[in-house]
Image (cartoon, rainbow, N blue to C red):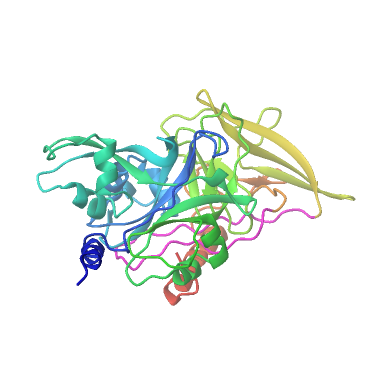
Amino acid sequence: MHPLLLHLLLLSLLFPSSLSKSTIEPCGAPPSTPTDPCPSLLSYTLYTDLKVAELAALFQTDPSALLAANSFDPSLPNAPNRILPAGLPVRVPTTCSCSDGIRKSVSTRYVTRPSDTLSSIAETVYGGLTSADQIKDANAISGALDVGQTLVIPLHCTCFNSTDNSLPAIYLSYVVNDGETLQSITAQYATTLTDIMNVNSMGSPLVSPGDIISIPLPACSSMFPRFASDYGLVVANGTYAITAGRCVQCSCGPGNLNLFCTPASLGASCSNMQCTGGTLMLGNYTAQATSSGCSVTSCNYGGFVNGTIITALSTSIQPQCPGQHLFPPLLSIPTSAMHQSYLPPSPAPLPQAGGTLNMPGSSIPGSIAGGPSGGPTGSAHALANQFNHVFYLTLLWSGVLFL
């Protein structure tokens, strides 16, 4: 055999062409993207049984934020200590920052154990969302790992201005599994092959196991001022987000892509959430039919500033009075790996219509035309929520809805 051909053959064996690839988003200098951090999601499959709180600690996120990102019911008894089974796919919320000229999440820390290697940490513990070389470079490791050593774990994420085709979006970092194709992934997330290829700057629709691609999920965006601590909040369709010191929870969909925020009742101490100049509490509204339409006055969330929950009273004329607000259904915390999260396609944003029902987990009922709408346990409201929960789980199990 010719020496050059032998050399190329050896290289192909040592460095196969199927090396994992990741979508990288530059940042930090024009004409690249801005340096503001953005909320992002990581698609993660549990490598072992973990409590909700343990999984949250693995990624340095809040357990309530982890529950909200997957629409798991936070009101279940002892929810943070519920055990999630190995093999369960979940979404992990993270903050995507600009570091070394590219987007990545650098807030996660990991303390090494006796059996750990850089490869096992990257591929097993963190599900391929990083690589051994990336961990090595981030921590300037030149030798063997020490037991109890604290490592910075850089995790793949993207922002892309929190938009997709000029509509609000939150980006999910997805690790391609064995047997998957780009076509099967696009079907799973109810998107198009063209959109995924454009987002990831792909020249062909070929993916390999271990590749990390960015998937835009339809979302609700906020309009909070830049000086608010939750500036840039984006919530994926069909899910929730916890903000304002765990005092406010905001939902997105399923009826429209307008962010809807109400008291969360998860924080130990929350500031007043009554709108100035009226009696309405956050998330409440009143509606009055007029000759020109329906006059709707609502109490809306305006961000978390210096420890204060900002509320704003607004009045608008709408073609018709809004009905009961439809919240994304809350799901029971799964006990098997067959679970898939609720995230159907959603319509484009509609004019803000306010809301009338309790946010799940909230102790403050909504109101319409000055009267309360929240009912006691066992009311039609509770029965409707239970029906929706069973209905959506049935669709999930039958394959009509996908992760």
Main secondary-structure element of the magenta-colored stretch: loop
Please give left or right for residue 111 compared with residue 115 in the image.
right
Question: Of all residues shown, which one is farthest toward the top?
Answer: 306
As drawn, is 52 to the left or to the right of 306? left
Q: Where is residue 326 in the image (x, y as percent from the top left)?
A: 60, 57
Q: Does the stretch in magenta take in 17?
A: no
Looking at the image, residue 46 sits to the left or right of residue 354; the answer is left
Question: Residue 209 is drawn in which quadrant?
Answer: bottom left
Image quadrant for the N terminus? bottom left
Q: Which of 208 and 68 is in front in this view?
A: 208
Question: Which is more toward the observer, 151 or 322?
Answer: 151
Residue 233: quadrant of the picture: top right
Magenta run includes residue 322: yes
Give the x, y percent position of residue 242.
47, 41
Q: Residue at x 72, y 50 (%)?
A: 351
Quadrant showing the C terminus: bottom left
User: Which stretch appears magenta?
Assistant: 320-349
